[in-house]
Amino acid sequence: MLYGLVLALRHDLYDTHLLPSHEVDVPTICVGNLAVGGTGKTPHIEYLIRLLSTRYKVAVLSRGYGRRSHGFCLADERSSARTLGDELMQMHRKFPAVPMAACKNRVEGIRRLKRLYPQIDVVLLDDAFQYRALKCGFNILLTTADNLYVDDLLLPWGTRRDLLTRAQHATAIIITKCSPSMRPIDKRVLDNKLHLPTFQKLFFLSLVY
């Protein structure tokens, strides 16, 4: 209950503009979730890189969880998991030509990326759904088929780290880790459980290795 009250107070401070939310001058796509992890954010960022890089100049910004560095850290040939975090380093190895950086302050990170690479068309944000200081242009919310956010509980009893009402701020919701043999009736059951408003789009995804 205490954790939920703190979350509600924090969101209320942003909703009433007592805490500022900033806009940036480059389109942004956020891939996030309401859980503490395990929904497939990194594979989705990689998918978006492959999808968009054929037409646009894409950059990636992450907080860089687990890194030992501080502040803004640009990915280059000297980077390692210690400086970028293991997930961002994994993406940097796969896409060395894509500008990537780790920065806890997402607003400052985007602005510095734009100064370094003025030709950037879009910035992909890894796990910034809870970062209210930035007004993101397009929010993708991930949730797993075996643990929908509507079935999960707030920490510490469950794995959900944010309020259920925050899901209403997503532009699209993707149910991940679906069985490749999922039937239409199974998708309908999950759709009915989420009760999405008409402006949100729902997608189902399976990973094939």
Image (cartoon, rainbow, N blue to C red):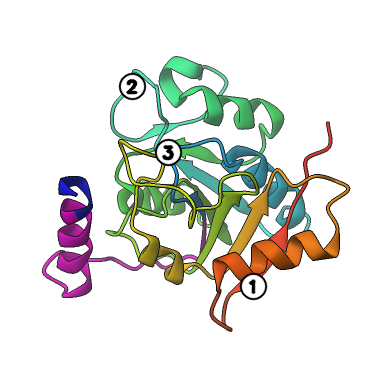
Spatial separation of the CA atoms under disc 3 and disc 1:
23 Å
**Residues in magenta, as a range:** 5-30
Residue 20 colored in magenta in the image:
yes
Q: Amino acid at mark 3?
A: Val
Q: Which residue is mark 3?
A: 36
Give the foreground label among 1 and 2: 1
Left or right of 68? Residue 6 is left
Residue 201: which disc? 1
Taking depth in this image into account, of 51 and 157 the one nearest to the observer is 157
- Residue at 28% across / 66% down in the picture? 22
Spatial separation of the CA atoms under disc 1 and disc 2:
37 Å
Horizontal and vertical percent position of residue 34: 43, 50
Taking depth in this image into account, of 125 and 92 the one nearest to the observer is 125
Q: Amino acid at mark 2?
A: Ser
Residue 131: which disc? none
Task: Assign a secondary structure to mark 1.
Answer: strand
